[in-house]
Amino acid sequence: MRHSSVRVLEFDAVLEMLDACAGSPLGKGLVRALQPSTDRAWIERQHRLTAEVRAFWRRGGRFEFGGLTDATPLLDRASVTGSALEIEELREVLLLAERASAWREIGLHPPADLDGGWPEVEALTRRIHDLSSLTGYFRNKFTPDGTLEDKASPELARLRREVEKQKRSIQDSLRGHLRRLAEDGAVQDELITIRGERFVIPVRVEQKRKVNGVVHGASSSGQTIYIEPLETIEQNNELVRMIEEEHAEVRRILAEMTRRIAESAPLLLAAIAVLAELELQFAKTRFAEDLTCVTPAFNEDALVLEKARHPVLERNLRRKDGHVVPLSVALEGGDRQLIISGPNTGGKTVALKTVGLLALMAQAGVPVPADRAELPVFDAVLADIGDYQSIEQNLSTFSAHVTNIDFMSKAATAHSLVMLDELGSATDPEEGAALAVAIAEHFKRIGCITVISTHHTALKVYAANSRGVLNASVGFDEKTLHPTYHLRVGVPGASAGINIAHQLGLNPQIIAAARERVGSQTRDISYFLDKLQEEVAASERERAGLRRREAEVEKERKRLEAEGLTDRKKKLKELESKLESLLRDFEYQAREAVAAVQERAAAQKLSKEAERRIARLRREFKEQFDATVVAHRSGADVGDPNARPREVKFVGEGDTVKLKSIGRNVRVDRRLDENTFEVSAGPMKMKVPRSDIAEVVTSARGDGDTPRQKPVEAARQRGISVTLASGDTAAPSEINVIGKTVDEATDAVERFVDHAYLAGLTRVRIIHGSGMGVLRKALRQYLKSHPHVETVSEPQQSEGGAGATVVELRT
């Protein structure tokens, strides 16, 4: 921007808040360098990046930036031929490479639940190249304490083994020497220590002549000296040589590592830039989430802020458990100036600073603390706020203001934002008012957006009489004599200077004298403004009441919609239940039709008839389905028990009924309610709904007890043509297969059981004899899998015992 009042509007304080949200020196450096821009493309891209990172953050996404630094100077040094970075410096660069690779994996594979993906973040991430070869080269090269691993090179591993071996050899020699000296009492302790990379032993001063060797120092008390015995001097010399070789190998390895870093320097520089940018976006995200900020929209023809808050003021008040009173401003549709009036300490200056600071934040790509923000992209944010008095520059308060405004009048364009605090103050009120109006008109002619705070009535009148200029006021409670800090656009405010002085405790006699000296015109204007403020307050209360009633109506509308939806869901569930009953009945009828064609000989003759039967069942099902849907939608079946599709109407206790779900007969033990029964099948008991009952096989009622229909007769009543080979439905209840082979007996028993089932018999006996038990076992195994057989059992001795088998047929 050509000129901006960054310091006056506390933009630096916002950067401090962002700096606290960054976690590494790398990110903090970019935060501190952040400045507002006039490049709309850059601004909008910054906001899109922040919005995408915020979406990631809200889904629990995090990334660790701690410990990252700007390694650019290290990369520059690494590029110098023959240079070698220190281990810590190499690890610093390696950390950057590892974090860049980790983020590359995240950035190129965003979370699946991230709506719309994150195109800006992905585009930024693609600037990080694949660094896996570099990180792979450094893998397992450093120990956690920051030294080179032995496996950094085969030569280093060999040298370190030799060094350790030499150290053990020297220690063994010294221990033998110590034992001999200890017998003479010449040594202080049987201890081996190191001085200057040479192994030595501690000896008492008075006994030093008993030890031949080189002295390498004394203890702090002077009672002990450290001697390297002559017999280990050569060993120590060899150790020093080995250590020097080890150091040389370490330097060679570090130089090779530095060369690898230098080869990847361009890729690493790009990764550093991306990580710094990403941490800036994460810092802005934390800032935005903490202050409930929004992404601003940019519109060259409007400045709209809804419930905007000054971020620094909000932070400071939070520390004191206070809260900020938000302000709303709208300059659109040709309005370019806002004149704010009202009492001192009422929040006029804060309003100016809030508008200016949020404009700077928006153009720096930082979300703004508001419910909604729509702003132009300003080419300059110019502010004259505060006291610029300077003794050093021989400027009075008024002179300083005039000097500043003169600069602003020349720098402002139609795309600038100008803020003037207490315009026309610090001089004669009449001349100050005239000057204030002239300055306001000058900026109006330029066409820039201007926000002015004032106490001058002339400026309030100017705003009321000029197109494109709006009055606004900060609230003041006449009852409590306290400012409310609410900004009302559309009405001017009274300065209430005497009331403020009274509230601050000024001598009552002075207050009374001041009221007497106020001219009648001033009193009338003040009264008018106070009355206007009261009417505006009453109007706002009425609007708030209307909004509450509107909210209540909307809440009631939603409640009724929810009830209607619940009712529709209930009806749909009822329809699903009815259709499910139809389906079960169709399945049952289909099974019955198939069961009627089990006899092999009759199957071929009945195939066409069975097809016609299935077709008729389909037609019946479709008719019932359509009728059910129509009746349900029209409500014709509500409360009508006969409208339920294919339900057995009369079921009583003691009846034998057939269930659709299992295809078996069961006994009704008791009736639980209108549509639920407890039934038993042998020892098993269960609860079944009326819709699961296919038919009443036998009724326990005296008036309805009818003999059971034979399957053939039932099939014929249903319109199925059935012809038996024997021509008669009568069948014997017993068969004798003694003397037959297993195959012969099985064929005979199969025909016998089928004939007995069609004849309606419920119990038959098969005589097969005892013998070796082969025929008995084969027949019983076959009968257990027969579809018409309910149970297979051995009769009593009076009925044949092991030589016969009793079969209960399904009914």
Image: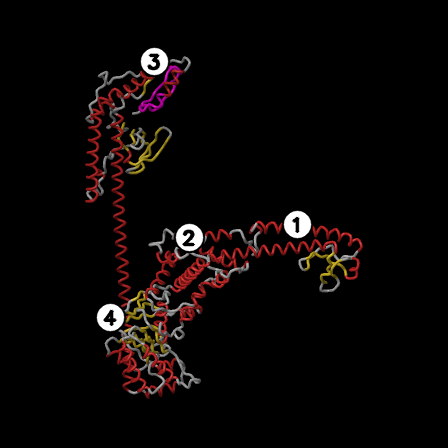
Q: Residues within 10 Å of mark 3 (few under 14, many from 20)?
A: some
**Separation of disc 4 and disc 2 at Cα?**
48 Å
Residue located beneath label 3 in the image: 737
The residue at 55%/56% (across/down) is 254
Q: Amino acid at mark 4?
A: Gly
Question: Any magenta on residue 789?
Answer: yes
- Which numbered disc, 1 or 2, marks the residue that appears first in the sequence? 2
Residue located beneath label 2 in the image: 105
The stretch of residues the image draws in magenta is 782-809
Residue located beneath label 4 in the image: 333
**Separation of disc 1 and disc 2 at Cα?**
45 Å
Residue located beneath label 1 in the image: 165
Labels 4, 3: front one: 4
The residue at 22%/30% (across/down) is 614
The one of 696 and 400 positioned closer to us in this rendering: 400
Any part of residue 797 in sight: no
Residue 55 image offset from top left, x and y in percent? 37, 57
